[in-house]
Image (cartoon, helix red, strand yellow):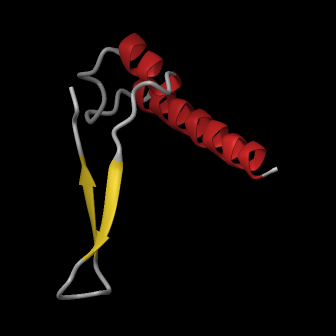
Amino acid sequence: MYSVHANNRQNDKKFCRIKAAKELFRKNDPNIIDYDKESLLRMLTDRAFHSPEMFNTDEEDHSKTVVNVYDFS
């Protein structure tokens, strides 16, 4: 049951990202207009494009979280 729920959440997130990217392209948003639309949308739909993230709590200030994103290419 958990995997079905988690999978649905992932699909919902993916759908929202694609919808947001399409809307930004439609509005000619300067933050996205330099990217190739087809390549970006293909990347958003393909789960192979994933950058693993590691979350750590700051040792000096435990209220802060540090996110490390690694590029393995």
Image quadrant in which you'd find residue 32: top left
As drawn, is 44 to the left or to the right of 63? right
- Residue 20 location, x and y as percent? 50, 36
17 above or below 44?
below
- Quarter of the picture holding the C terminus: top left
Q: Residue at x 46, y 16 (%)?
A: 42
- Residue 6 location, x and y as percent? 68, 48
Q: Residue at x 39, y 34 (%)?
A: 50
3 above or below 18?
below
Image quadrant in which you'd find residue 28: top left
- Residue 66 location, x and y as percent? 26, 67
Q: Residue at x 72, y 46 (%)?
A: 3
As drawn, is 27 to the left or to the right of 53? right
- Which residue in the rendered view is the most extreme toward the left? 60
- Which residue in the rendered view is the most extreme toward the right? 1
Numbered label tally: 0
Of residues 35 and 12, the one drawn nearer to the viewer in this rendering: 12
Q: Residue at x 42, y 32 (%)?
A: 24
As drawn, is 64 to the left or to the right of 26? left
63 above or below 35?
below
40 above or below 21?
above
